[in-house]
Image: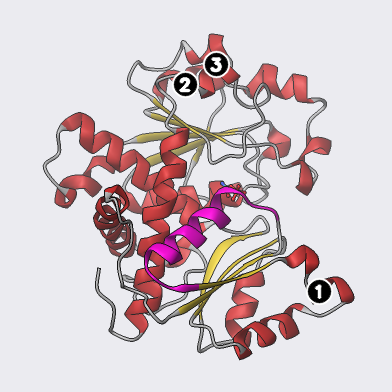
Amino acid sequence: MTSSIRGENLLSLNDLDRDAIVEVLDTAEAFVEVNRRTIKKVPALKGRVVASLFFEESTRTRLSFETAAKRLSADVLSLAVASSSMKKGESLRDTIATVDALGIDAVVMRHQSSGAALQVSRYVPHVRVINAGDGLHQHPTQGLLDAFTVRQVLAERRGAAGVETGSELFEGLRVLIVGDIRHSRVARSDIAAYVALGAEVRVAAPGTLLPEFLADWPVGVVDDFDEALEWADVVALLRLQRERGSGSFVPSLGEFTTSFGLTVERARRLRTDALIMHPGPMNRGVEIDSLVADSAAAVITRQVQNGVPIRMAVLYLCVAGSHGGGSQ
Ligand code: CP
């Protein structure tokens, strides 16, 4: 367990205690203000080089990491994997060594294999490695931005004066995570963040989409999804991960939607102040009805917006923290 990511890699939220998570959320709060300015740029990482290596598809995470790095004044090396020499058979190790030879301070990487970010951190121990999603293992910055979004909305509602009180908003908070828990790195990171901050987490899914060894997870399992909707303060829907074979774990998409989709009718069971979340990309009409996704209770666009300040905070703490330099 670490109590700060300053100067460290960020591979998994399971490695972070409450203080480390709160430090990221508080740092992101300062960067929200930077993102509201006309000139959305600070010199915190001027002269540093961040490599953006996405070996698996991404829209939100890649764009917001690259935006975050540029707003911190870092230079960004973005590898277009599909047209890179990996297509000629170059290995991950040689690709990383090549990028490192250009002179980098950090790697932000997404990969289809669980553990790939840890592996890369061993190849280049002098470079800070930030996991942007590895297989079904972890998606740490998604967990952080989801917790940040919940804290932001609750603080606004309760008129909390400042970030000092923000993390206490999680005490007793009831979070329901629904869908393909088995294949979801977002679920793993969200659970780590919410539990560390003091929330109670329950999961709802068909038995086939629950992970093995669930008894080791710090969550409750819901028997009755409809009842759980009435219990929850926050409902987070997950996408069926068809690229990881989720389709073969349910009889049909229609049956999944009937049993576990957040339809308009089901959404009526939610408390009036409940938050609806989805990390994206959404399968509208499968895990979430389009009208529900676009309703006032949904904070899905805010989750995307918060990706930039959270990733600025992570880059700042991991990269500037390693040299004791940089200023916001
Ligand atoms: N939530 C998320 O990771 O989205 P992308 O795959 O578009 O990055």
Q: Secondary structure at mark 3?
A: helix
Residue tagged by mark 3? 291
Q: Separation of disc 1 and disc 2 at Cα? A: 46 Å
For the point 42% across and 44% down, the residue is: 305
**Looking at this view, is 67 or 161 the one in front?**
67
Taking depth in this image into account, of 113 and 210 the one nearest to the observer is: 113
Point out the tag, 3 or 2, that comes first from the N-terminus: 2
Marks 3/2 in contact by CB < 8 Å: the verdict is: no
Q: Say which amino acid is labelled 2.
A: Leu
Give, as a three-letter code, the residue at label 3.
Leu
Q: Which residue is mark 1?
A: 86
- What percent of the width, then of the height, locates residue 16? 39, 65
Report how far apart the C-alphas of labels 3 and 1 lie in the structure.
42 Å
Q: Nearer the viewer, mark 3 or mark 2?
A: 3
Q: Circle 2 sits on which residue?
A: 229
Q: Horizontal placement of 251 versus 22: left or right?
A: right
